[in-house]
Amino acid sequence: MSIYYARNPQGVLEVKEFATDSTQALLRISDPVSTNLVKGYTNAELIGDKLLTPVTMPKQTGRFPAFGQEAFVVAGDLKRMAGGKIARLNMQTGYVTASIDQYAEGVAIPQEDLNEWAGAPEMLVNGKILTVTARINLYREYLQAVACTTTTNYASGHYISGAAYAWATTGDPVKKAWDAQELILKKNGRFGNVAFFSWGAWTLFINNASVLKRIKYGGSPIAPSQLTPQAAAQLLHVDEVLIGGAVYGVGSAVGSDGGVGKSSLTKAFLWDSVQSNNFGILIRGAGSGIEPAFGYTWVRMNSPIVESYFENQTKSMVYDQQHFFTPAVTANEAGVLIYSIA
């Protein structure tokens, strides 16, 4: 029998058994309580799922149909006389292979930690589980950011250096954005419906004199603080503007992982990690996985999974998380990236 000590509301130590304490150790292969907790955790700074829409799949590997450009043809055989044959479209169909990877990490909670913990047991458990979740979610955001800011993921002519665009001085970001929309429109028959800025590109955009002059009111230019993502969306003719504000840290010493008492991390903005100052416009899919869109995040059904068990060797409860997902570019002509903007 595995036991630990915990204080009751009166402050008296009581002996508890892991197997019978529902808040600490559900000795099951899958822990539904912790799984639901993980599914409900979100970070306001993460935008990847809003660009590469998650699509749930029942398998880790499968195929989605891919269609050609038949929808752009002005057909001359659609008019039908009474009793005549109905014209039939012969489509050259292909497929996109969707393969989903697994990302996993766990955390252990020793009996000693519970004995000394001053608060309710679930506070300690939830705090550690959600820290693991945040780490996996940040890695998911990293993969999505790399997919959206890597130039070779875009079609030829759809990735453009912004080194000479002068957004910091006399350039016109809105005009360049509309040039990007024209590229998308010509190749896809519709505009991009979502735009993203890395933090560096956003600060250039909101301080640009040309941008501020476009949305002034009452005869006075507005301040950069009044240029909201909603106002930018109206300027760019998109449904939503997203700002990549997620931050990641790199250890400044060997073995440093941001833990208490260890060397501090060097922080940077995730969406500026491939190169600095990125701006993009994409066609965002609705979530079926078959309509044209720049990309999707394939997610396996019932992901994530949390397993909990008691480990006798270390006298600890262990909570392992498994997340199944893969961001993928599915239509490289359905987006435009402007990178290294100056």
Image: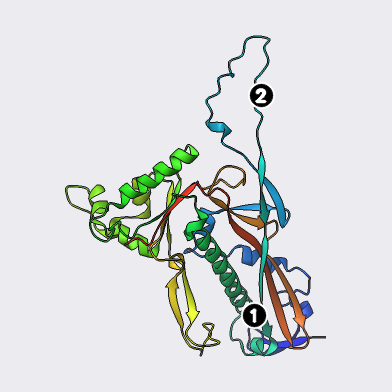
Residue 42 visible in the picture = no
Name the quadrant containing residue 91: top right
Q: Residue 200 at what x, y percent from top left?
A: 36, 65
* Cα distance in 3D space between marks 2 and 1: 66 Å
Residue 22 vs residue 232, the one in the foreground: 232
Q: Nearer the viewer, residue 119 or 261?
A: 261
Which residue is depicted at the point 75% across and 68% down? 30
Disc 2 or 1, which lies upstream in sequence? 2
From the image, tell me which residue sits under label 1. Answer: 121
The amino acid type, in three-letter code, at marker 1 is Pro
Report the front residue among 33 and 265.
265
The residue sitting at 56% across, 32% down in the picture is: 71
Viewer-nearest residue: 187 or 46: 187
User: Secondary structure beneath disc 1?
Assistant: helix
Q: Residues within 10 Å of mark 1 (few under 14, many from 20)?
A: some
Q: Residue at horizontal 73%, vertical 74%?
A: 308
Residue 134 shows in this picture: yes
The quadrant of the rendering that contains the C terminus is bottom left
Q: Which residue is at a point 30% across and 58% down the rendered structure image?
A: 164
* Residue extending furthest toward the top: 82
